[in-house]
Image (cartoon, rainbow, N blue to C red):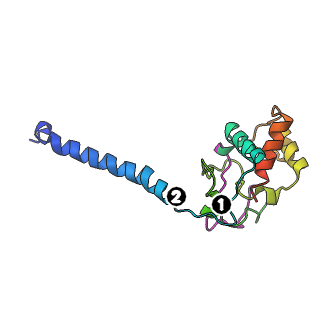
């Protein structure tokens, strides 16, 4: 019969090897890979207002429903409301100056990586913040009418970088 007490050292070694492998593949390799991404003309550097809007985007939870990445095979495929408008494939250089990177993978709402190309109207975007149901019946997006004018302007400045 197998006695765990006699093999405790091997079990502990196996656990440590497994844990070490998990740490290396989950944290260390992605961190090293991210450091090798070079900035290009596509890399966005935010103004103070755009960065404030990005903080509002995170604070209000937009990141939980909207992705900001178009994967290979999805380019120019479709959006939820309009066919053929999702945009071109995003590249790592787009995110080189971001910390944290807001790629996400949830798409309860449309992908926003090219949102300002699809809906470039400030008036439309402000109406959408106030009452999304009016512009997109059946949407899951809650209204953000409680945001101050400054917060809305900052958020719009950030969304304008998503082209």
Q: CA distance from mark 1 to mark 2?
A: 14 Å
Please tell me how crowded label 1 is: few (under 14), some (14-19), or many (20+) other residues with Cα within 10 Å: many
Residue 134 image-quadrant placement: top right
Please give the residue where the numbered disc 1 appears in the rendered image. 94
Dot 1: what SS?
helix
Q: Nearer the viewer, residue 127 or 42?
A: 42
Please tell me whether residue 112 belongs to the stretch shown in magenta: no
Residue ranking furthest to the top: 146
**Quadrant location of the C terminus in the rendered image:** bottom right
Q: Quick one: label 1 or label 2, which is nearer the N terminus?
A: 2
Secondary element at image label 2: helix
Q: Position of residue 145 (x, y in %)?
A: 83, 34
1 vs 2, front mark: 2
- For the image, the number of numbered tags is 2
Q: Is residue 15 left or right of residue 86?
A: left
* Boundaries of the magenta span: 64-80
Name the residue at 66% across, 45% down. Answer: 63
Q: Position of residue 16 (x, y in %)?
A: 27, 45
For disc 2, the marked residue is 35
Q: Is residue 105 left or right of residue 60?
A: left
Percent across and percent down for residue 28 are 43, 52
Q: Is residue 67 magenta?
A: yes
Residue drawn at (64%, 43%) of the image: 64
Can the viewer see residue 138 in this picture?
no
Q: Which quadrant would the N terminus be assigned to in this image?
A: top left
Main secondary structure type of the part rendered in magenta: loop
Q: How many C-alpha atoms fall within 10 Å of the one at disc 2: few (<14), some, or many (≥20)?
A: few
């Amino acid at each position: 019969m197998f006695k765990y007490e006699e093999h405790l050292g091997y079990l502990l070694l196996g656990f440590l090897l497994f844990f070490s492998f998990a740490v290396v593949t989950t944290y260390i390799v992605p961190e090293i890979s991210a450091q090798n991404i070079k900035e290009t003309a596509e890399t966005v550097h935010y103004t103070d207002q755009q960065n404030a809007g990005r903080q509002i985007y995170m604070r209000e939870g937009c990141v939980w429903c909207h992705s900001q990445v178009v994967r290979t095979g999805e380019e120019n495929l479709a959006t939820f409301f309009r066919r053929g408008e999702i945009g071109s494939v995003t590249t790592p250089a787009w995110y080189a100056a971001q910390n944290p990177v807001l790629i996400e993978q949830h798409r309860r709402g449309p992908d926003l990586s090219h949102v300002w190309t699809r809906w470039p109207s400030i008036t439309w975007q402000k109406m959408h913040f106030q009452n999304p149901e009016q512009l997109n019946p059946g949407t899951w997006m809650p209204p953000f009418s409680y945001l101050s004018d400054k917060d809305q302007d900052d958020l719009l400045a950030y969304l304008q970088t998503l082209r």
